[in-house]
Amino acid sequence: MKLKGHIESFVLVSLGILSAAMGIKGFLLSTKFIDGGVTGMSMLIAKTTGIPLSILIFLINLPFLILGYRQLGVIFAVKSALAIAGLSFCLAFIYFPDVTHDKGLTSVFGGIFIGIGAGLAIRGGAVLDGTEIAGMLVSKKMQLFKARDVILVFNLVIFTAAVFFLGIEPALYSIITYLGASKMIDFVLNGIEQYTGITVVSSKGDEIRKAISKRGRGVTVYEGKSGYGKDGHINAPRDIVFTVATRLEIPSIKREILEIDPAAFIVQHSIEDTSGGLVKRTGMH
């Protein structure tokens, strides 16, 4: 099983490298368009100075890899260093055809290939861009900022610089590229079935639990008490029912809950991913 895991990781990272290299070299390099993150910064510097992109991608990612080694461990840092080195090698020595000269197609599909590559690498336990590491580390040090906030600010600086050095139109197309890449990363990591957690507070908790269980979904029941009013006056005991379902199932589940108890209090919250349980083993009903 351990060998199988290593082979799977190697295949995912290798496919990720090839996909990202195709997005960069097969689409973006023939234009002034760039991506976000460290990759985008490297592309911007390469386009304005003439320094080879393959060298810049590795050198600029290096400080982030060192931080990743200190905070996330040796295995992660080594795998990421090898993945980024592999991407640099592909950009330097492997031929990729210039697929299209259409600006719209270039920006969209460049982002798609880069996003698929980055997502596959992450699933394989590595990163192709050190921005994620930086965002995570800064968010740990500064509790007011989330990793996404740090990445957003980082990319705003890059695309603002792109306006001055590359022009407004290339910068706008570059934003489309980045958005496409971001969406594809989410798709590769989470798939089409994005999960939603549902918490239900109701006096008819047992009936709601049975209704959800009949769908083949796992249910967790907490014992609680409802409160209301300015002083938080405690009402009768309530069962708090929690389950996880795909976003396509949510409307029918809510409808069934409200048929059982129109006064039920329902809270939905996004879930990045799940493992185990019944969520991924049962179909929709």
Image (tube, rainbow, N blue to C red):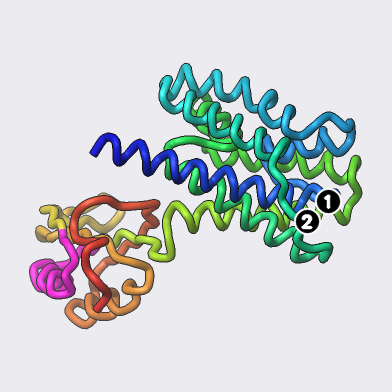
- Camera-side residue: 32 or 94? 94
Residue at disc 2, secondary structure: loop
Q: Amino acid at mark 1?
A: Ser
Residue 198 x %, y %:
28, 62
Q: Residue at x 84, y 43 (%)?
A: 162
Q: Residue furthest bottom?
A: 259
Query: Residue 273: horizontal and vertical position, in percent?
Result: 35, 52
Q: Could you tell me if the residues under marks 1 and 2 are in contact, i.e. CB atoms within 8 Å? A: yes
Q: Quadrant of residue 109?
A: bottom right
Mark 2 Cα within 10 Å, few/some/many (few <14, many 20+)? some
Residue 17: in sight, yes or no?
Answer: yes
Helix, strand or loop at mark 1: loop
Residue 115 position, x and y percent, is 59, 51
Residue under label 1, please give it. Answer: 30
Q: What count of labels does the image hold?
A: 2
Looking at the picture, does residue 57 appear above or below residue 254? Answer: above
What segment carries the magenta color? 200-219
**In which quadrant is the N terminus drawn?**
top left
Task: Specify which label sits upstream in the sequence, 1 or 2.
Answer: 1
Q: Residues within 10 Å of mark 1 (few under 14, many from 20)?
A: some
Amino acid at circle 2: Asp
- The reply to whether the magenta stretch includes residue 14 is no
Which residue has dot 2 on it?
98
Q: Quadrant of residue 169?
A: bottom right
Viewer-side residue, 269 vs 95: 95
Q: CA distance from mark 1 to mark 2?
A: 7 Å
